[in-house]
């Protein structure tokens, strides 16, 4: 039997209503997360989360670069979207959503702490230069299959999923547990297609529960 884990991506206040980088309908993912948590708890499936966790001087912040949010540039040689200040370490915006069943989360993996590079994936920074502890944590526990959902579809969910596939995990994405920034209207749809093309299996929560 291969072990599975649920990975909840960046279910943080700043990506929800009223947040600094609010994702349309971001809050609606929390009910899906709590339902999935309950489903996983009933099956002894491990539950972990990632948190975007930036220092106040993070290089992805438009304010730090003196540019306009949602425009593009380069950061440390990589294409970069400039974001509003978000998920600043220890701020309320960086906290997990208050309605999320946090007690169920066994471990949290922080990312985006290095001010010189952005980190959409929960496994690596955007240049694949440094790795978080997530992969070794999962491997040490024999986890080879992931259930992924969270915010935002077109950034952190997408890059976390693509890295997980490259690292050899089987990845199931729960689509109604995800919402996207959609700087371009089709970004989330394209991100789901890319995840599926690279080998992820997409399910709605209902499909997932019915087929397992
Ligand atoms: C994210 C943009 C900037 C995300 C994080 O969690 O998807 N998006 N930082
Ligand atoms: Zn960020």
Image (cartoon, helix red, strand yellow):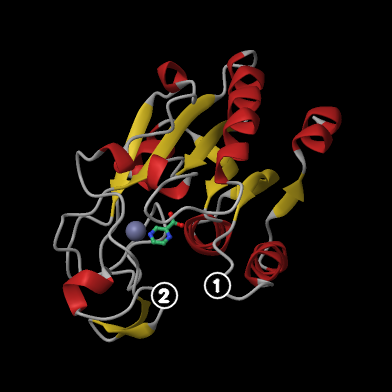
User: Left or right: where does residue 114 sit relative to residue 45?
Assistant: left
Closest to the observer, 25 or 200: 25
Which quadrant: the C terminus? top right
Tell me the number on the disc at residue 129. Answer: none
Which is nearer the N-term, disc 1 or disc 2? 2
Q: Nearer the viewer, residue 144 or 106?
A: 106
From the top left corner, tell me how far across and down residue 40 is, in percent: 61, 22
Residue carrying label 2: 70
> Which element is circle 1 on?
loop
Q: Quadrant of residue 103?
A: top left
Return the x and y of residue 162 as percentages of the image width and height.
54, 62
Could you say whether the residue bearing mark 2 is in a helix, strand or loop? loop
Q: Quadrant of the N terminus?
A: top right
Kindly identify which residue carries mark 1: 183
What residue lies at 36% left-to-right and 37% top-to-bottom? Answer: 137
Alpha-carbon span between mark 1 and mark 2: 8 Å
Q: Identify the residue at image location x=40%, y=52%.
A: 122
Q: Residue at x 56, y 39 (%)?
A: 27
Tell which quarter ligand 2 is in.
bottom left
Q: Which x, y percent locates residue 126?
A: 35, 69
């Amino acid at each position: 039997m291969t072990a599975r884990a649920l990975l909840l991506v960046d279910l943080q206040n700043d990506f929800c209503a009223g947040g600094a980088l609010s994702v349309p309908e971001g809050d609606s993912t929390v009910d899906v997360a709590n339902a999935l948590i309950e489903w996983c708890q009933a099956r002894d499936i491990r539950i972990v989360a990632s948190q975007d966790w930036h220092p106040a001087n993070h290089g992805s912040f438009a304010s730090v670069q003196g540019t306009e949010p949602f425009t593009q540039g380069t950061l440390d040689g990589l294409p970069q979207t400039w974001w509003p200040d978000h998920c600043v370490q220890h701020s309320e915006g960086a906290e997990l959503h208050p309605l999320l069943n946090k007690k169920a989360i066994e471990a949290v993996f922080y990312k985006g702490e290095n001010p010189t590079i952005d980190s959409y994936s929960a496994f690596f920074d955007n240049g694949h230069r440094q790795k978080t502890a997530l992969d070794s944590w999962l491997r040490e526990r024999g986890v080879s299959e992931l259930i992924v959902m969270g915010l935002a579809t077109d950034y952190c969910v997408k890059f976390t999923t693509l890295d997980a596939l490259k690292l050899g995990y089987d990845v199931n994405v729960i689509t109604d547990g995800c919402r996207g920034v959609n700087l371009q209207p089709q970004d989330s749809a394209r991100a789901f297609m890319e995840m599926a093309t690279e080998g992820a299996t997409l399910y709605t929560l209902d499909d997932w529960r019915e087929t397992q």
